[in-house]
Image: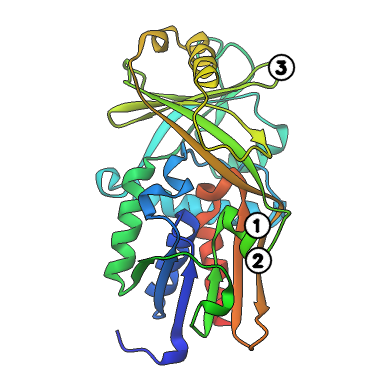
Amino acid sequence: MDSEPDDEVIVVGGGVIGLTTAVVLAERGRRVRVWTRDPVERTTSAVAGALWWPYRIEPVALARRWALRSLDVYEELAARPGATGVRMVEGVLGEADPDDAWVADRLPGLRPATDREYRGTGLWARLPLIDMAVHLRWLRARFLDAGGAIEVRTVSGFAEVEAPVVVNCTGMGARELVPDTSVRPVRGQLVVVENPGIRTWLVSTDAAGAMAYFFPQPGRLLLGGTADEDDFSTEPDPAVAAAIVRRCAALRPEIAGARVLDHRVGLRPTRNAVRLERELLPDGRLLVHNYGHGGAGVTVSWGCASEAARLVAG
């Protein structure tokens, strides 16, 4: 790819936000490198469920637009599920927020769940469900095919990132790197089990506010979950894991006997609002921030990547 030196962009962060942003920039002709502290397969994104749904994050109006742009892409990618890791899967969103009704026009199959499908008030929907292990590998390959490069390296300050344009997609890392102490962890723990034959997903919240969800992925079933604010621990808690299995088994009894394959923990990089904006570094170089998506990174990744690319272009 022929490019001028001032076309170079370094994206800091190799999770789904960083990789998607890098793909969009590279495919628009920029010379892009990704610097990531952890290998792609060990980022927080690798732990995600990951179901597309327009989870409420701020700024609401923009987040809805980013989510719908991402939905368009995932629907296209679902035509090649084995390659991209994206499938369209049916399931029930329990205790849905009335504010979610705005998305009904975009999801023609959205309807109230029947009593047989869910004991409570829920929405039946066919949504993108993403196998993150496959999807992250696919994103990395697409980025490399577009001429990009990936380096595993830690960044302690933007001054050491030698490129005319820097894009900050560091998630929780932004807390120290920016620094931005408004970025806070919301800890999520998952249990991976053998799938006892479940083909639909389910997300539920009980009267006490405890979450239970299960997502069928190829060869396994992901069980969750938790949302523990300001908890920095990445070690699985056996008691929490047992409680997750109990809650999920209360919804589908066959889960109770499923063999446990793995335990996973991720820290959702939550902020009062997504930060997606331009900033000039002291030396005049351009810094574009794209972080603070919480648990909605998969939902808004393509929309945010397009907006970040627009900000880079000026």
Whichever of labels 3 and 2 marks the residue nearer the N terminus, that label is: 2
- Identify the image quadrant of the C terminus: bottom right
Location of residue 230 by image quarter: top right
Q: Which residue is mark 3?
A: 208
Instruction: Report if residue 311 is visible in the image.
Output: no
Horizontal side of 105 relative to 1 (left or right) equals right
State the scheme by which the image is colored.
rainbow
Instruction: Place residue 216 in its image quadrant.
Output: top left
**Disc 2 to disc 1, C-alpha distance:** 6 Å
How many residues crowd mark 3 within 10 Å: few (<14), some (14–19), many (20+)? Answer: few
Residue 140 percent location from the top left of the image: 33, 60
Rendering quarter of residue 55: top right
In the rendered view of the protein, which quadrant contains the N terminus? Answer: bottom left
Residue designated by label 1:
175
**Circle 2/circle 1 CB separation < 8 Å:** yes
Q: Nearer the viewer, residue 308 or 105?
A: 308
Q: CA distance from mark 1 to mark 3?
A: 31 Å
Q: Residue at x 41, y 13 (%)?
A: 255
Residue visible at 69% across and 22% down?
209
Report the disc number at residue 178. 2
Q: Nearer the viewer, mark 1 or mark 3?
A: 1
CB contact under 8 Å: marks 1 and 3: no
Amino acid at circle 2: Val
Q: Indicate the secondary structure of the residue bearing disc 1.
A: helix
